[in-house]
Image: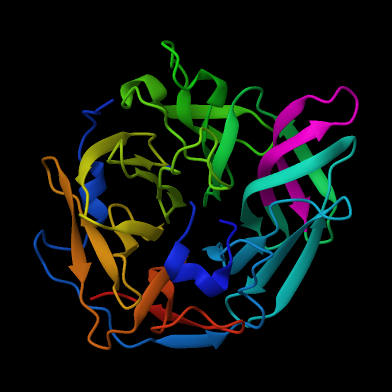
């Protein structure tokens, strides 16, 4: 999400069919419904130099790294910056595609300890058409593979533990029309082969939906959405107007969907899926000091409910993602510093 991080908590992030599958999802949930969780003191802290700069997106975790990038290309390249969650060491990648101009990175994720997934759009230098793409690039900046997605614009991406990738996206030209017959959530091999797809657009409210994290497409406020790859499942959260959580077991392909009761007056600022059915999100409630962590309580009946994870220190600010079972987040009552301290905790 591209924004001035010094004003992070004033502008707060511009910011992914009801199923009758067996309740596989609850097997991974170690929480009793209605149980109050608490955020313990950080079990680990790490200073990450230069992680928050206004020229790049707000960083999130991805397979052992903190990742941030410039959306718009400069000098024919987009900058992707990685920080190791083990050491804080920085890795910079200059990303560019042949025969392209005006490249916009919409999202990126770490695929492996040497490769990154990049999704976005570019203008073809041959005919001036806009192209939607997925690329795999190594840490040296060499593009390994690229495949095109036609009229489907990928707006979120995550790299799964089975080596595949997931995208949440839209066919933006179809919004507002009567025929919304495509699936928004897609699972691909890195060579572009479609493995499976979920979340029919026609099953969501038939209103103009804008999930594009780089800003408004239709002149309306961007709808908040998140895509998260956990240890064994993949989840999508779309806030208003859809208000859904969809989770898929990567091994079986079984899915389950819940309606989610939204938190009045809140804006979701980050989300992560640690294990199957264990979802955490940070919310902003309109005041500088009013930022809280919540766990999504997934009962056997709808709707799912956000339950606050209490923080005795009252310092929790924003979730950046996960590292194993632990959530990674920043603390503090002010906007994050240029060289922030990031924290690890496992809610209990």
Examine the image and state in which quarter residue 209 appears. Answer: top left
Depicted 80 relative to depicted 118: above or below: below
Residue 46: tell me if it is visible: yes
- In this view of the protein, which residue sits in the foreground, 233 or 184? 184
At which x and y percent is residue 203?
32, 23
Task: Name which residue lies at 21% across and 39% down.
Answer: 259
Left or right, 257 with reference to 42: left
At which x and y percent is residue 206?
34, 22
Left or right, 107 with reference to 321: right
Depicted 286 relative to depicted 20: above or below: below
The residue at the far top in this view is 178
Answer whether residue 261 is magenta in the image. no
Left or right, 228 with reference to 79: left
Answer whether residue 132 is magenta in the image. yes
The secondary structure making up most of the magenta span is: strand
State which quarter of the image contains the N terminus. Answer: bottom right
At which x and y percent is residue 285?
29, 65
State which quarter of the image contains the C terminus. Answer: bottom left
- In this view of the protein, which residue sits in the foreground, 295 or 204? 204
Residues in magenta? Answer: 117-138
Task: Name which residue lies at 69% across and 80% down.
Answer: 89
- In this view of the protein, which residue sits in the foreground, 50 or 219? 219
Residue 320: tell me if it is visible: no
The residue at the far front in this view is 219
Task: Name which residue lies at 58% across and 61% down.
Answer: 3
At which x and y percent is residue 322?
44, 66
Task: Name which residue lies at 41% across and 68% down.
Answer: 319
- In this view of the protein, which residue sits in the foreground, 187 or 167? 167
Examine the image and state in which quarter residue 303 appears. Answer: top left
Left or right, 139 with reference to 256: right
Depicted 179 relative to depicted 150: above or below: above
Depicted 114 relative to depicted 105: above or below: below
């Amino acid at each position: 999400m591209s924004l001035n991080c010094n004003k992070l908590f004033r502008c707060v992030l511009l910011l992914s069919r009801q199923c009758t599958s067996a309740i596989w999802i609850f097997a991974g949930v170690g929480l009793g419904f209605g149980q109050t969780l608490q955020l313990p003191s950080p079990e680990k802290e790490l200073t990450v130099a230069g992680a928050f700069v206004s020229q790049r997106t707000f960083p999130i975790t991805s397979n052992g790294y903190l990742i941030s990038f410039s959306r718009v290309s400069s000098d024919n390249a987009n900058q992707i910056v990685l920080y190791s969650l083990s050491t804080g060491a920085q890795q910079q990648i200059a990303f560019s595609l042949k025969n392209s101009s005006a490249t916009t990175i919409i999202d990126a994720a770490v695929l492996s300890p040497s490769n990154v997934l990049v999704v976005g759009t570019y203008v073809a230098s041959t005919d001036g058409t806009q192209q939607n793409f997925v690329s795999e690039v190594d840490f040296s900046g060499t593009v390994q593979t690229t495949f095109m997605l036609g009229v489907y614009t990928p707006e979120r991406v995550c790299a799964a533990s089975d080596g595949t990738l997931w995208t949440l996206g839209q066919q933006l030209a179809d919004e507002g029309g009567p025929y919304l017959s495509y699936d928004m959530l897609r699972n691909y091999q890195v060579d572009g082969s479609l493995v499976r797809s979920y979340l029919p657009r026609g099953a969501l409210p038939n209103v103009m939906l804008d999930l594009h994290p780089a800003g408004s497409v239709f002149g309306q406020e961007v709808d908040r959405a998140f895509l998260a790859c956990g240890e064994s499942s993949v989840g999508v959260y779309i806030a208003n107007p859809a208000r859904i959580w969809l989770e898929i077991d990567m091994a079986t392909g079984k899915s389950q969907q819940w309606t989610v009761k939204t938190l009045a007056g809140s804006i979701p600022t980050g989300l992560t899926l640690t294990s199957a059915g264990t979802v955490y999100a940070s919310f902003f409630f309109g005041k500088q000091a009013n930022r809280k962590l919540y766990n999504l309580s997934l009962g056997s009946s709808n709707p799912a409910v956000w339950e606050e994870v209490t923080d005795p220190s009252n310092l929790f600010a924003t979730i950046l993602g996960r590292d194993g079972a632990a959530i990674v987040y920043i603390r503090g009552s002010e906007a994050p510093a240029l060289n922030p301290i990031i924290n690890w905790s496992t809610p209990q």
